[in-house]
Structure formats: C-alpha cells, structure tokens
Image (cartoon, grey):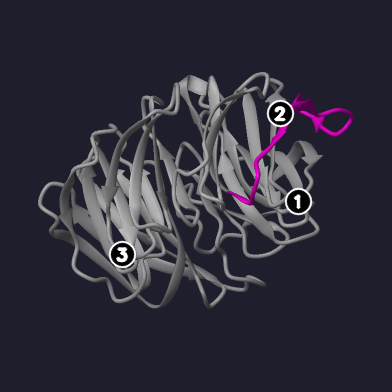
C-alpha cells in the first residue's frame, strides 16, 4: 500500500507518496499528462500507480521474461514501450495496462528503447544493432552492426536518430536507415545527450572525460578531470547548460556566448556519493539530481552554471533515476530498495 512521505522532504519538495515494487526498479515514466506513473523492474513486471495518491492502478507481472531493460513513454502519454532480456519489445495502453503489441527483436537482450518526438516511430537497440519500428510495433529497418554494443540512443528529430558506441556517434535517417553523419572519438562512449536545439552532442567517456561536438560547425572539445566516468548527462530546456555527473559533485558547463571552452564550470556540492541521475525541468533551469547513497536534490541554476539547492529529500536506497512530471509540479524517484517516491514540487 502507498504511504505518505512524512518529515523527510525539505524546501520545494513537499510530502507526496511512497510505494514499492517487488524487485529492483529499472525504469519509470509519467503517462496520461501525469495522471499515472509506471515502473518496470528486474523481475520483468510493469505496473502503474496513480500519480497523486500512489494507488496501484494495474500490474503485468510477466511483461518480460528475465527482466525489464528500458522503458519509454510516447509523446502523447498514452502508450508505454518496454524492452527486456527476452529480446522483445512490448507496447502497453498506459491507461489500463493492456498489451497492444509484442515484437520479437532478436535472440539477445534489448537494452534501449525510445519513442520519436512525434510518437510515430520507436527505436530499439539490441547488442550492436539498432532497429526502427512504427508506432504499432512493426519493423521498418535495422542497422548494420555497430563497432561495439550500442550504449545509448536518442532522437534528434522525427527524421534523425543518434546512437553512441565505442569510438563514435552515428546519425541515421529515420526513413531510409542511411547514415547522415558520423562523429568519431577514440574511446568508449558510455552516455549521450543532445541539446534541445540539436546543435550540441555530448558524450561521457570511459576515460573519465566529457566530449562534445557542435554539429553547426564541426567543432569538438573535451572536458577532463572527472573522478569517475560521466555516465549522467542532462541539457537544460534552453540548450544553455549541460549538467554532468562523474563524481559526488555536479559539474555544469554553460554554452552561452563562446562557452564552455575557456570558462570555469559551475560546481554543485551537496551529495556524499557519486551522482546516479540528472534531469532538468521541462520549463525552467531547475535540475533534479540523485546519488548512490539515496539523496535527491532540486537545484536552481543561473545561465553560467552556478546555482543553489532549492530542496531535497532522502530515499531508502541508491537513486536509480528521477523523473519530472510533464507539468513539473511533481518529481518521482525510483531507488535500489524497490521504492517509488513522489514529491509535490512547490512553486519557487
């Protein structure tokens, strides 16, 4: 049963609800304009909770044999896509959890899934191969093998998809499957983020650096000196700020003017364990962060990357991810102990 979160949240984070799933939560997402919050876990189940009360609305205990790997919500919030260790893509009606379609992708794990911005297409990756599908789950095309396992994928526009793997970022034409562009870097790329305006491509690297390219002029730069590999990256809604993990502190680079080259980044200090999740608000330069010791903080940032904490709250385990509700009036976190915590976010 859901429980109210009492005497924990501070600042802009206000008491919401707490619920649990049966196993380690892998992915989550808001649907139906924030009316429901869905979670997929390591046991292979997918379930949805009322976004206000935390009441369980539906549950599919055997959505994927072996466990969930990734989930994505369509742009209209009506469909939920999940992929798992069983090599399948499943499409669900977000309102009632009814299975709409199931597609066999391959014999191996399907690690990533993402809806296009319009909701007309889906992209999934399994090992070295990326596949594009229609919104109904029908395959359109599959790529040739990447040099290594695809570590991340993200839509640029409805007509272009980006992927990251060892040594390169590749841009594919959605309709034809042909490569539009290839950005190369000698190293293992572990994370990928695109600025909302589509100009900047940022990747965290195994060598504890962040590499980024400007597609408008081909310029590329590297920011090094991180204690750990920067597996968490997030751009602000206006494409000005890039927040990066890679340690206990959050490093924020500003792309205003001629930056970030030759500038000093903002550093947000609070967490006592490595950053495990970063997500910017959809409408403001408010950043939510989570760490491996179980703390969640909301920050207000300036245009140059500096900022201050607006509020925070502990959770029971390592923060797997944080999710802003579409209207940014609530924030959800899933943690390693199976907890789902939702806070109301007070206007600041």
Q: Dot 3 corresponds to which residue? A: 107
The part of the image, by quadrant, that contains residue 292 is bottom right
Residue 30 screen position, x and y as percent: 51, 30
Using a 10 Å C-alpha cutoff, classify the residue at mark 1 as few (fewer than 14 neighbours), some (14 to 19) or many (20 or more).
some
Residue numbers of the magenta segment: 1-25
Pointer 2: what residue? 343
Judge whether 153 appears above or below 62 on screen. Answer: below
Judge left or right: residue 72 versus residue 209. Answer: left
Please tell me which residue lies in front, 38 or 287: 38
Precedes in sequence: disc 1 or disc 2? 1
Q: Which residue is mark 1?
A: 317
**Label of residue 348 in the image:** none
What is the CA distance from the residue labelled 1 to the residue labelled 3? 33 Å
Q: Quadrant of the N terminus?
A: top right
Residue shown at the point (38%, 25%) measured from the top left: 78
| Residue ID at (65%, 22%) | 55
């Amino acid at each position: 049963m859901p429980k109210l979160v009492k005497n924990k949240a501070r600042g802009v984070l206000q008491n919401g609800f707490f619920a649990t799933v049966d196993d380690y939560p892998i992915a989550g997402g808001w649907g139906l304009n924030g009316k429901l919050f869905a979670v997929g876990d390591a046991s292979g189940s997918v379930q949805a909770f009322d976004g206000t009360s935390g009441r369980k609305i539906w549950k599919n205990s055997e959505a994927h044999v072996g466990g969930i790997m990734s989930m994505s919500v369509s742009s209209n919030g009506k469909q939920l896509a999940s992929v798992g260790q069983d090599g399948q893509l499943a499409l669900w009606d977000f309102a009632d959890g009814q299975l709409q379609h199931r597609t066999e992708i391959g014999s191996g794990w399907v690690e990533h899934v993402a809806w296009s911005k319009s909701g007309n297409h889906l992209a999934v990756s399994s090992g070295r191969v990326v596949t594009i599908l229609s919104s109904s789950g029908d395959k359109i095309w599959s790529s040739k093998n990447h040099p290594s396992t695809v570590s991340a994928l993200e839509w640029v526009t409805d007509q272009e998809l980006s992927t990251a793997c060892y040594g390169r970022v590749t841009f594919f034409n959605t309709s034809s499957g042909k490569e539009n562009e290839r950005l190369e870097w000698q190293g293992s790329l572990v994370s990928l983020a695109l600025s909302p305006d589509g100009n900047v491509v940022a990747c965290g690297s195994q060598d504890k650096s962040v590499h980024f390219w400007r597609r408008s002029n081909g310029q590329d730069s590297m920011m090094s000196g991180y204690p750990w590999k920067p597996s968490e990256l997030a751009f602000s809604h206006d494409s000005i700020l890039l927040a990066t993990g890679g340690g206990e502190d959050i490093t924020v680079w500003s792309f205003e003017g001629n930056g970030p080259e030759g500038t000093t980044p903002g550093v947000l200090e609070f967490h006592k364990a490595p950053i495990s999740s970063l997500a910017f608000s959809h409408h403001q330069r408010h950043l939510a962060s989570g760490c491996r010791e179980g703390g969640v903080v909301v920050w207000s940032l300036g245009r140059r990357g500096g900022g201050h904490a607006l509020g925070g709250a502990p959770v029971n385990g390592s923060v797997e991810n944080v999710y802003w509700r579409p209207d940014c009036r609530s924030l959800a976190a899933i943690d390693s102990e199976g907890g789902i915590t939702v806070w109301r976010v007070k206007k600041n």
